[in-house]
Image (cartoon, coloured by chain):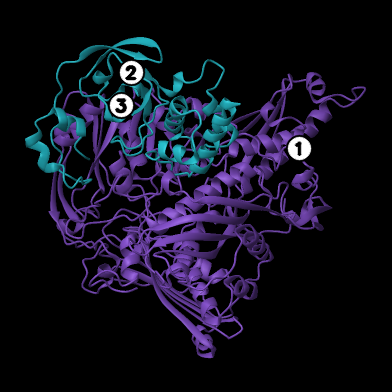
Chain colours: A cyan, B purple
Amino acid sequence: MEINRREFLLGTGAAIAGHLAPAASGAPVAPAVDTAAPLRVVLTVNGAERALEIEPQVTLAEVLRGPLALTGTKIGCDRGACAACTVWIDGAPALSCMMFARDAVGRAIATIEGLARREALHPVQAAFIEHDAIQCGFCTPGLVMSCAALLERNPRPSPEDVKSAIAGHMCRCGTYPHVVDAVLAAAKKGAA
Amino acid sequence: MSAADQETRVQLYPAGLVPGTLSQIERRVPADEPPPLPANAELAWIGKPVARYEGRAKVTGATRFTVDIHLPGMLHGRLLRSPHAHARLLSLDVLPAAALPQVRAALAVNEAAGRPVEAPPPPDAGPLARARRVLYAGDIVAAVAADTPAAAGRALAAIRAEYQPLPFVVDLERASASDAPLVYERPVRGENYAGAIPGGEAPPQNGNVRGPSTAGSRGDARAGLAQADLVIDGEYRTQVQTHCCLETHAVIADWRDDGLTVYLSTQYTAGVRAELARAYELPLQRVRVVVEATGGGFGSKSSAGPYVRAAVALSRAARAPVRVVLDRHEEQVDSGNRPATLQRLRIGAKRDGSLTAIDLEAWGTAGVALGAGVGFIAQSLYRCDNFAIAQSDVFINAGPGCAMRAPGNVPGAFALEQAVDELAGRLGLDPLELRDRIDPSPVRRAERRLGAERFGWRPRAPGADASPVKRGVGMAQSLWAAGVQTNASCEVRIHRDGSVEVLSGVQDIGTGIRTVLAQVVGETLGLRPADIDVRIGDTDFPAGPPSYGSMTTASLSPAARNAAHRALLELRRLTAGQTGRLSFRESCARLPVDRVSAVASRSEDYGGFARRSGDMAQAQTTLGGVQFAQVAVDTETGAVRVERVVAAQDCGRPINPRQVESQVHGGILMGLSYALYEERVIDRHTGHVLNADLEHYKIARAGEIPSIDVVLLEHYRGTSSTDAYGIAEPSNIATTPAIANAIYNAIGVRLRHLPMTPAAVLAALGRVPGGRPA
């Protein structure tokens, strides 16, 4: 097992730093750092205010997936290297595994569950289906969030703009070519 | 009833390639098979790019992967892993963990699933010799379950494990030396699998080297080399690649008095059920495996690995459901990998290109596991009477390898297809022309022609560009067995209200089997695929095939069509005598019972299988493909950019060409990534993996994708009620050697080691002071 990064951040760094490198599967197990008292927070998620009690060290991704049961947001690496956990914070894509939940207080959090307007899919979602920009689907919600955000800020992207917008995402099935097709098609439809 | 007793009839089936002119082939088939299916052009739904069945669920985040499941009372399991690459476990005390608050179970774990079985120590061996040895850093030692993840973490920290570190070895060449530390001290038993050639005696075991196995050799390669006008001789090395599924391995085990339910991110629900039933001596019906969606597998989620066994043991001890989800580090270290290989390949040829001998000596390491063979493609792709193979597994102190997308053939093709390219160059032949002479497959001949047309293939001299950024083109071929699982069943239910359900235990790992089932059943019943409800991923349904070996569609789509056909016959029988021509819905409304149902299983291929062993069979044909690549090599930085790939592929009758194209994209990108970027690195001094994450383990992403064209052939042979085969693996084999051949064509120097990094390119060009030329 590894030392949890957030335990490290909040704990006595000096005492356990020695175990961090190299991050080895068999690194000696340090005692977990007991966290400070739980916090009462209100998070604004998909337009609704959600009051809950959280431990101060939990990430936004953990709170979304756990107490809020919004499991569409995925954790692939838990360290900002795969972007499966992408949500919008105040309209901009952000990695929810790299953000403490308490730092999201007072900001507008949008997740994949809030992207479609009831039955009406976001044009990017519809285009993902149309162009089969999906395989196993685990990275898909994160990709959809980044691509939808791209169209919000740039309604007429070039193929290079799309690749750049998803450059941080990891898709092992290899959906990227169809993702690019889908986003360009959605943009074209939006412009028509 | 034997096949000979069955009633049969003779039918004509479409045969041949599209594009091309189809003929007909006569087949004698069991009388209850559905009527022949015409070619795709004449069908309503099969062969059309129908949208993915679960597309809406996947783009809205509604799909529930195993990691998304939360059961009432569920505990959080974690695993204690060895910090040593090799050690004797002198003592292990889990009681301090068990005594902590919120901790519900703490157990020693000693599971060898996925590894060969080592002979027991002699009866007179002392306690030290009998102590468990952990064989790699990350080997599982103990497991805990607690109410919260944090409590589980505290429990792990409380376990007392005392180790005596032992010498270890983590690379293939050092492990092969006679004085290397031994991974296994005594003989092991175990099966090789894909990639290796089956058959033959258990090979010898000397030190860490288990082999050579010479099964599959034919003719006299030594004589063939002596007769050759020229011999191509090369040594090739390939690295360890890790699967990197986006959903890490995940399980929730729920042991109850009336049976065991396992929610599992898996490629094979039916196989895992059988494994667990055997392991815990439960009747099959008391074990249930469930998965709505598997977040990637690529071979690594084929069986119930040690972490699954640990979760089951924890649930049994704690009397509660236990969730174990590997973190990314555990995933990269201990969830399987593609073995590293070292191949010495010699090919003898006459001046006309005909091959007189193929002689392959190969060593591979799957860590502590078996199965690093590479010989199948060299044995089978080209016409050659004399083939000698000697392949060995080499044990090292690293996590067990396992099947990974086209196991054996991906590293095997890297060597073989470069050697054939080199031969073409030496003979002054276009590599396509050489293959026309030595490749007996009419399908690949068509793929070479169609692919070359699409690519605009023109042979060009190696290193022809004068500028520092040099372009090159290359091509390579693929070969994969057309596998079928006969234990593949499907139920089709037609309800009184006209609704239709398809049920099978088969799982969705992203290849789109739900859509395939909806298309096949819709086509058979005259309904739209959207009218069909598909329910899969549960062993309570008829047993589904595995999602590995590129055999899911080949195995299950005929069963689905047969079940739909029989359910329709039953509907007609029960509503016969009704007056007038009834629509499907009207017929259903006249059913005397709420529903009719039929279950069908995969029949033998019409005309028979090539071979069959238990539930596994191989068709008389093979699957293949031909890929072309264009690269730009910056000779100042060494960076290689793949600009374009054209893939001409076949998979029998394609059921959903868009989903096929998605899979081909995946195969190409995985091959490109293997060619240029990926490599697991283990520190020789500590035995730890240094890049067990997704930032230091480099994988091609969106910025690296080339322009990709897929040319998809339809190949009809009249072998089953759908005539469909698979695509995932054949599409992953030719990319890496096509890129390697293109790099050679660009710079005039051949790279025989993977990955072909900028440093390797510069070294090959002699641009690294003190660097070695390739």
Q: Nearer the viewer, mark 3 or mark 1?
A: 1
Q: Which chain letter matches label 3?
A: B
Query: Residue under circle 3?
Result: B75
Disc 2 packing (10 Å; few <14; some 14–19; many ≥20): few
Instruction: Return the residue nearer the eye: B593 or B47.
Output: B47
Residue B24 x, y percent position in the rendering: 82, 57
Q: Nearer the viewer, mark 2 or mark 3?
A: 2
What is the secondary structure assignment of the residue under circle 1? Answer: loop
* Amino acid type of the residue that numbered disc 1 sits on in the rendered structure: Ala
What is the secondary structure assignment of the residue under circle 2? Answer: loop
Residue B210 x, y percent position in the rendering: 35, 69
Question: Would residue B536 be visible to someone looking at this image?
Answer: no
Disc 1 packing (10 Å; few <14; some 14–19; many ≥20): some
Residue B600 x, y percent position in the rendering: 68, 40
The numbered mark at residue A67 is: 2
In the displayed structure image, the side of residue B72 where residue A160 appears, left or right: right
In the displayed structure image, the side of residue B410 where residue B164 appears, left or right: left
What's the residue at 55%, 44% (across, down)?
Answer: B662
Residue B767 lies, with reference to residue A65, above or below; the image says below
- Labels 3 and 1 touching (C-beta < 8 A): no
The numbered mark at residue B44 is: 1
Separation (CA) of disc 1 from disc 2: 46 Å
* Amino acid type of the residue that numbered disc 2 sits on in the rendered structure: Pro
In the displayed structure image, the side of residue B420 where residue B159 appears, left or right: left
Residue B380 lies, with reference to residue B670, above or below; the image says below
What's the residue at 72%, 37% (across, down)?
Answer: B45
* Amino acid type of the residue that numbered disc 3 sits on in the rendered structure: Leu
What is the secondary structure assignment of the residue under circle 3? Answer: strand
Instruction: Return the residue nearer the eye: B507 or A71.
Output: A71
Residue B106 x, y percent position in the rendering: 23, 34
Snapshot quadrant of residue A132: top right
Snapshot quadrant of residue B188: bottom left
